[in-house]
Image: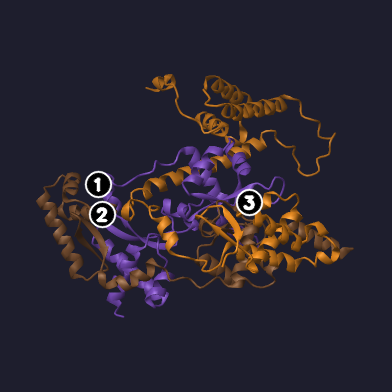
Chain colours: A orange, B brown, C purple
Amino acid sequence: MGEQKTYQIRLQVFEGPLDLLLHLIERAEIDIYNIPIVEITDQYLAYLEKMQFFNLQEAADFLLMAATLMQIKARMLLPRPVLEDTEPEEGEEELDPRQELVERLLEYKKVKALASELQSKEAEALKFFPRAGGFFADREIAAASSDPVGEVTLWDLVQAFSALLESLVPRLELEGMPREEYSIPDRMESILTRLASEPRICFRALLAGQATRQAIVATFLALLELIRMRKVGVYQDQVFGEIVIQRWEE
Amino acid sequence: MHLSFATAVIEALIFASSEPLKVKEIAGILGLAEETVRELIRELQQEYQEKRRGIQILEVAGGYQFLTNPDCAPYVEKLKKVPRQPTLSQAALETLAIIAYKQPITRAEIETLRGVRVDSSITTLLERGLIQEAGRKDGPGRPILYVTTNDFLKYFGLKSLDDLPLVDDWSNNQQLAINLTAD
Amino acid sequence: MHLSFATAVIEALIFASSEPLKVKEIAGILGLAEETVRELIRELQQEYQEKRRGIQILEVAGGYQFLTNPDCAPYVEKLKKVPRQPTLSQAALETLAIIAYKQPITRAEIETLRGVRVDSSITTLLERGLIQEAGRKDGPGRPILYVTTNDFLKYFGLKSLDDLPLVDDWSNNQQLAINLTAD
């Protein structure tokens, strides 16, 4: 029976190079803190030859690990530097070239353990059915019917944020930071001019047309001011729709 | 199958079905005669009725369905259309704005920016589902980090956080402020 | 209000709510103390439990919700109108586990832990509403941070993030324990 097992072709899919390495180590019943790097590297490469990759990226992930293994192997085979030569400052012993790999493997082992915990939780949770065939079936309706923000709009939110910014920054205008070309009254005028020729402007397009951050801020503040003065209105056709700016009509 | 277990299964089936469930379908799933199923449903209905519970099983559109007890309707209605919440306070709004633009952020960081305690506005925002906890920050005390929720995006009509209107960058401004006062 | 009627109303409310219902919300609707509500829910839960019924009230994602009895699952699965999503792949589970324990976390940090690209599992998890973006990390490139959602708790039947199984030094609780003993 035992013999038969060795002839079985493993069709197991590995989730990545760490998964494959962990499999090799566990199969060989090796101490993870003392990996026989030559042996494991050979096995890893042998597996790599047999593996089929779905895409280039996947192959690259596995090849990167192969390169890492070979690098560690080379460092292990090289003669160690003489201790007297370089006085070790931080630790007594020099760093084992395998250490980083061991740490990554240990971390990944935890990931696998957690993933399998989640999997059993998932299997368990799927035995509990909610009303009407799905937790999330009427989430949209539920969300639409309750209104946690009341009368507050996105504009209020942004305004609050801008106001906070201003309170934190010593008056920029006094320091002459925003140049004349970004003055808010100018921007207000230019928005109104544009609205005289176009019935409506997309919010996104309005800001996208601005060259610098200061220009964007000035335009944005100008827009807020126009809204406050009720010279323009903003609306959305639909939730998630474009924010559209148009002249205020009585 | 024990009839008491069959009754439990029928209860579960009627509950989980998205439409009024027909006796025929129940009978098919359980491998019981339709008459038996009908009898068990009748018992279930009676049980709910006698105890004057909050929910009951009713025959609707040729099938069976759970519905809330009409006596409870005035309360259930309050649930459905959660009365228009009072508008967010200025304090809550400012806290929300900071979290939206600076997330993930800790309570202490928000307090530094606002210059006041923000416990109550954080509670309000958590309750209204606009923000949520999202792990802890590395470092002393491992304080809780706050982020905005998907509902936050929904209520403000945003597709993603990148849709938040640009506001001159906070960190740059602070830098600037420091530079200005240092001169 | 009679407590027996209050219990019926609570039953109706939990049933009617499309989301796990919070004690606070029930208390608000009924005008009762939260502790009273909690006690009444406990009694209700017990009643359903004792009778081994087809449905029960469970605490999920910080609220209470009716769910079918798991013993009935093999039958409920046969219902025609219960749409089911496929279970999560191993890759998605590994990515989700990392996010759940290390949130908020960037894509690159997840990739370091898993040793592979995680673009497709992130997309899957976002689409299924189990994770969400939560701002950006300070530093080069300002990468997007990911956190788990409330639906994550519901999907796995967890009361809160503290319900996640403990693993070595990976949970907040353990960190805390270490900090305490260090003092």
Q: Quadrant of residue C180?
A: bottom right
Establish whether labels 3 and 1 are both on one chain: no
Q: Nearer the viewer, residue A241 or A16?
A: A241
Q: Which amino acid type is marked by label 1?
A: Tyr
Can you tell which of label 2 and label 3 is closer to the viewer? 3
Answer above or below: position of C105 versus A184. Answer: above
Q: CA distance from mark 2 to mark 3?
A: 50 Å
- What is the quadrant of the C terminus of chain C in the image? bottom right
Q: Can residue C135 be seen in the rendering of this structure?
A: no
Establish whether labels 2 and 3 are both on one chain: no
Q: Which amino acid type is marked by label 3?
A: Arg
> Disc 1 designates what residue?
C75
Rendering coords of residue A150 (x, y %): 51, 68
**Which chain is disc 3 placed on?**
A
Q: Name the residue at 41% across, 19% down.
A: A3
Q: CA distance from mark 3 to mark 1?
A: 52 Å
**Which chain is disc 2 placed on?**
B
Q: Can residue C53 be seen in the rendering of this structure?
A: yes
**Which chain is disc 1 placed on?**
C
Assign a secondary structure to mark 1: helix
Rendering coords of residue A5 (x, y %): 41, 23
> Disc 2 designates what residue?
B12
- What is the quadrant of the N terminus of chain C in the image? bottom left
Q: What is the crowding at mark 1: few (fewer than 14 residues within 10 Å), some, or many (at least 20)?
A: some
Give the side of residue A212 with respect to residue B122, left or right: right
Q: Are marks 2 and 1 in contact (CB under 8 Å)?
A: yes
